RNA sequence: GGGCGCUUAACUCAGCGGUAGAGUGCCACCUUCACACGGUGGAAGUCGCAGGUUCGAAUCCUGCAGCGCCCACCA
């Protein structure tokens, strides 16, 4: 039984149209003031913990952000209404190269570890005069301060968008990946891994970006198709004879250290074990056999250089070949001298003359010059009068490795780097991935594939400035040699440190870079090293073990699929290495927003849609509707029509509430079978939506809720009870109708609240919020107890369904007879089996009132005959159109 | 080259073993007292192609094609 009070709501007291912009401003402020979405630190209520993706704030905002973040928010809101203590923080990823570039330009500064201290607090944006001077050099701490300052502005823009969009984030849990806290966490992570032996430093050939001048990790590398050409170049055999190799990188000829052919290739078998002589440089290099050589590719015999590609690195290791690094860290040809131990040559004078032309030149320029030289017969290794280039270059397209943010191909450069050991953890990491629920499930395959195919340990050191410093120093021997074998790390209590500024334990600043003193590791961590700690940063980890225990492992990690191999992978790796567990129970992978031509939106293509004007035009709720109509993991073409549909729903919710709350009746129970039947079916819809939301299927749940709202409520039930709800003669019927309308609306608003937080909050507050004005977003999700109290039955539901069907059948008959909705029907015959007729009669007056039928005849069909409710109207006669006036 | 996903009405998408669905758009009608950002009704699809399993397939299996994504040693 449910009692209703006389309505306290006057529809005239609210605007006749929903003003989204005003509602958004009003309610986002109200929620923040009231702490509606605050995580309750001390509560023992079950928690729901979200590992929010920190957006890169230096990037631009586009609809993709709105799309994926809204999908997380609906889950947060649902769980909150289910009574969970929701932990929903927001981080900002301000760490990394994009920010570094912006800060350099904005303030006209450069970072240089070891630069003198400088107070940046008064530094302003550089003006033209300042730009004429060389950039100011800053030590790392000062540079980081500027980055923090500049990104604070970007973060404001993001925060404004998130608040406008109605993300139910707990803003007291805000963090950024370069903050002191995050730096401390990253360094603690390093110390923990260091103590457990999971990190090591090594001088080795590493993938290197020549523009950013830093090492990069496998996860940040992508293949891009590039035009190239096979160059067929004749080598001499020292004992006599020659052969022709094919290469796409002739500029690496001076770095050639060996020649390889397949062991079973009859053409080259006699050469194995002998020495070849390179053209131009006359370097003697061994010829060895390797099954990795494809006899069908090129000429079937190839030159091995340090380093042309990953196979070169492998051969270099396996065959213990010498290192001849000609490409410098800037991508230009380094100065080397032939005729020395490192660069042997049978004709040093000719070799040096040839090499002199390319010193300091870029890779492409060097290639051009070397090819030109190879066309000259003088360059041949055996002086037989023929040019080493035996044919014109044969164009081809091949995949070349690039740093994902880079513009020029990666080179393999030997350098000292820090690595996290992951190859030895592959099986465990795969196991962790399998323990996690992936939504949608097929995304787990991406994780597995990546983990299985991991080739190298995680290179975490970067030769950059704006990042978390690697907290390491090295001893310098009495003779001035740096001892990389035994790195020194700081006291965990003293973090964060900057080793280029702070001295290691037991040393003083005066001993920096001195014999018998110490030297700093001047590198910073890969930004993923910090980002992969987003759960630990948010919980406080070892700094607040009790809090960490409550929040970790987390419930869900929302993210997009292109960073499974980075963010998801590294976060799983960190949780495993640090605590031997998974970081979260579920991963929710959002799809991409594609442009209407189904192409990925990207700044370079110029097809990016920015979100603000959409919010202005359609309102946040409608934009959210669009985001939430798309299932997890499914890429969706941007379609403004869906925004219109969302807007339509918002307006309908607003108007339906205005109407329902305007109905008045004396208190009375919900007793009419049609009313009970309506609520019974609403219960069904609620149960289905609840089950779907529990499985994170928010989009199908929205479909269920929305469909019931339109078809089950506004288009049918509401129309049928309009008459009874203002009846002067049927007091109990009127009380029942008004109570059921209010009850149904109350429930529907709560079901829609996670999707359309603004309009639902607005409508809720007209009456349902009560004296306390408690937010709908803290109201309970409609549950079984609530419905049980209504004592509905399946028979009621049958009455309601027959009534809906009859309404449709009569409307159809009316339209076909040429009538309109408002036209009265003089007489109508409704033919159905007795059982259906019986159900029909229980709601007859409501049906007739909604369809304006004046006189009804019923006709009982034989039970068991085929019968369709849609064609139950067997006769209809419209009433005459009343005279105008 | 390997893997994953998608292919259903003009458009955007649901359905995933039992007689083809929604919304938009289109057509007709309606100033009906919540809402014209509305209402009522209608037309519209051999569910990418070819096989197979089944009493029955858009739905399961196999193969193929197109699109997209992820991955793969640049000779």
Image (cartoon, grey):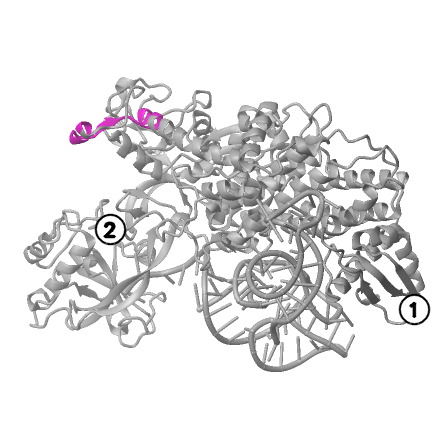
- Considering only order in the chain, which callout, 2 or 1, is on the residue closer to the N terminus? 2
Q: Position of residue B22 (x, y in %)?
A: 66, 59
**Observer able to see residue A750:** no
Where disc 2 sits, the SS reads loop
- How many residues crowd mark 2 within 10 Å: few (<14), some (14–19), many (20+)? some
Question: Disc 1 sits on a residue from what chain?
Answer: A
Residue A514: image quadrant is top left
- How many residues crowd mark 1 within 10 Å: few (<14), some (14–19), many (20+)? some
Start-end of magenta stretch: A129-145
Q: Identify the residue shown where x is 72% and y is 59%.
A: A820
Q: Is residue A162 above or below residue A442?
A: above
Q: Position of residue A319 (x, y in %)?
A: 31, 57
Total numbered circles: 2
Residue A215: image quadrant is top left
Q: Position of residue A175 (x, y in %)?
A: 48, 29
Where disc 1 sits, the SS reads loop
Checking the image for residue A323, the label placed there is 2
In the displayed structure image, the side of residue B69 where residue A643 appears, left or right: right
Quadrant in which the N terminus of chain A is drawn: top right
Q: CA distance from mark 1 to mark 2?
A: 96 Å
Q: Which residue is mark 1?
A: A861
Q: Nearer the viewer, mark 1 or mark 2?
A: 1
Q: Front-most of A397 and A758?
A: A758
Q: Position of residue A353 (x, y in %)?
A: 6, 55
In the displayed structure image, the side of residue A354 where residue B21 appears, left or right: right
Q: Front-most of B59 and A638?
A: A638
In the displayed structure image, the side of residue A718 where residue A293 appears, left or right: left
Question: Disc 2 sits on a residue from what chain?
Answer: A
In the displayed structure image, the side of residue A647 where residue A197 appears, left or right: left
Q: Identify the residue shown where x is 28% and y is 73%.
A: A269
The magenta stretch spans residue A133: yes
Residue A245: image quadrant is bottom left
């Amino acid at each position: 039984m449910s009692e209703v009070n006389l309505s306290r709501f006057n529809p005239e007291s609210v605007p006749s149209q929903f003003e989204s912009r005003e509602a958004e401003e009003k309610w986002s402020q109200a929620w923040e003031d009231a702490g509606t979405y605050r995580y309750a630190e001390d509560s023992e209520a079950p928690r729901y913990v979200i590992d929010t993706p920190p957006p890169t704030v230096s990037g631009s905002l586009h609809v993709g952000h709105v799309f994926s973040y809204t999908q997380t928010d609906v889950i947060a809101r649902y769980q909150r209404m289910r009574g969970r203590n929701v932990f929903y923080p927001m981080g900002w990823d301000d760490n990394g190269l994009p920010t570094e570039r912006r800060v350099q330009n904005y303030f006209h500064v450069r970072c240089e570890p070891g630069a003198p201290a400088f107070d940046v607090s008064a530094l302003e944006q550089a003006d033209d005069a300042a730009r004429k001077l060389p950039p100011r050099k800053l030590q790392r701490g000062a540079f980081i301060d500027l980055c923090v300052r500049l990104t604070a502005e970007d973060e404001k823009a993001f925060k404004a968008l998130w608040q406008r969009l109605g993300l139910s984030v707990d803003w007291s849990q805000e963090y950024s990946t370069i903050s002191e806290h995050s730096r401390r966490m990253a360094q603690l992570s390093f110390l923990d891994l260091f103590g457990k032996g999971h990190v090591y430093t090594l001088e080795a050939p590493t993938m290197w970006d020549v523009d950013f001048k830093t090492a990069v990790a496998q996860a940040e590398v992508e293949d891009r198709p590039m035009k190239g050409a096979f160059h067929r170049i004749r080598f001499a055999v020292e004992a006599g004879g020659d052969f022709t190799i094919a290469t796409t990188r002739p500029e690496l000829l001076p770095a050639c250290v060996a020649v390889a052919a397949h062991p079973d290739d009859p053409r080259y078998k006699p050469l194995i074990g002998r020495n070849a002589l390179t053209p131009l440089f006359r370097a003697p290099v061994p010829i060895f056999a390797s099954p990795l050589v494809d006899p069908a590719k090129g000429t079937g015999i190839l030159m091995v250089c340090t380093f042309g590609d990953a196979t070169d690195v492998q051969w270099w290791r396996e065959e213990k070949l010498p290192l001849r690094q000609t490409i410098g860290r800037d991508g230009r040809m380094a100065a080397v001298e032939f005729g020395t131990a490192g660069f042997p040559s049978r004709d040093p004078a000719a070799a040096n003359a040839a090499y002199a032309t390319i010193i300091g030149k870029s890779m492409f320029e060097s290639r051009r010059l070397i090819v030109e030289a190879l066309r000259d017969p003088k360059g041949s290794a055996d002086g037989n009068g023929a040019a080493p280039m035996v044919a014109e270059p044969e164009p081809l397209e091949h995949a070349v490795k690039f740093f994902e943010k880079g513009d020029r191909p990666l080179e393999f450069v030997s350098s000292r780097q820090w690595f996290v050991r992951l190859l030895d953890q592959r099986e465990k990491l795969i196991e962790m991935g399998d323990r996690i629920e992936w939504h949608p499930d097929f995304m787990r395959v991406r994780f597995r594939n990546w983990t299985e195919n991991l080739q190298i340990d995680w290179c975490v050191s970067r030769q950059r400035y704006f990042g978390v410093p690697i907290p390491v120093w090295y001893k310098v021997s009495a003779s001035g040699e740096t001892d990389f074998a035994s790195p020194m790390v700081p006291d965990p209590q003293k973090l964060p440190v900057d080793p280029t500024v702070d001295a290691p334990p037991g040393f003083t600043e005066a001993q920096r870079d001195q014999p018998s003193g110490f030297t700093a590791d001047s590198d910073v961590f890969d930004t993923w090293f910090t980002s992969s700690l987003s759960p630990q940063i948010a919980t406080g980890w070892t700094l607040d073990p009790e809090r960490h225990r409550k929040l970790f492992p987390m419930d869900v990690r929302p993210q997009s699929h292109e960073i499974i191999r980075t963010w998801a992978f590294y976060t799983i790796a960190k949780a495993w290495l640090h605590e031997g567990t998974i970081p979260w129970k579920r991963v929710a992978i959002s799809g991409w927003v594609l442009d209407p031509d189904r192409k990925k939106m990207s700044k370079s293509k110029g097809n990016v849609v920015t979100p603000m004007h959409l919010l202005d035009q359609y309102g946040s709720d409608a934009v959210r509707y669009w985001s939430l109509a798309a299932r997890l993991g499914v890429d969706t073409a941007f379609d403004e029509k869906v925004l219109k549909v969302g807007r339509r729903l918002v307006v309908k919710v607003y108007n339906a509430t205005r109407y329902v709350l305007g109905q008045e009746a004396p208190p009375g129970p919900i007793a009419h079978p049609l009313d009970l039947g309506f609520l019974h079916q609403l219960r069904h819809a609620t149960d289905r939506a609840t089950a779907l939301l529990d499985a994170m299927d928010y989009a199908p749940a929205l479909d269920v809720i929305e469909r019931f709202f339109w078809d089950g409520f506004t288009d049918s039930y509401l129309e049928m009870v309009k008459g009874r709800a203002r009846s002067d003669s049927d007091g109990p019927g009127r009380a029942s109708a008004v109570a059921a309308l209010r009850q149904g609306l109350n429930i529907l608003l709560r079901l829609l609240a996670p999707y359309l937080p603004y309009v639902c909050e607005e409508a809720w507050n007209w009456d349902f919020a009560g004296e306390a004005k408690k937010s709908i977003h803290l109201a309970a999700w409609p549950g079984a107890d609530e419905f049980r109290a209504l004592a509905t039955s399946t028979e009621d539901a049958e009455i309601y369904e027959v009534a809906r069907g009859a309404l449709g059948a009569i409307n159809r008959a009316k339209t076909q007879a040429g009538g309109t909705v408002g036209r009265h029907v003089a007489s109508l015959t409704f033919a159905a089996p007795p059982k259906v007729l019986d159900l029909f009669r229980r709601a007859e007056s409501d049906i007739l009132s909604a369809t304006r039928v004046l006189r009804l005849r019923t006709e009982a069909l034989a039970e068991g005959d085929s019968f369709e409710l849609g064609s139950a109207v067997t006769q209809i006669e419209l009433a005459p159109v009343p005279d105008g006036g």
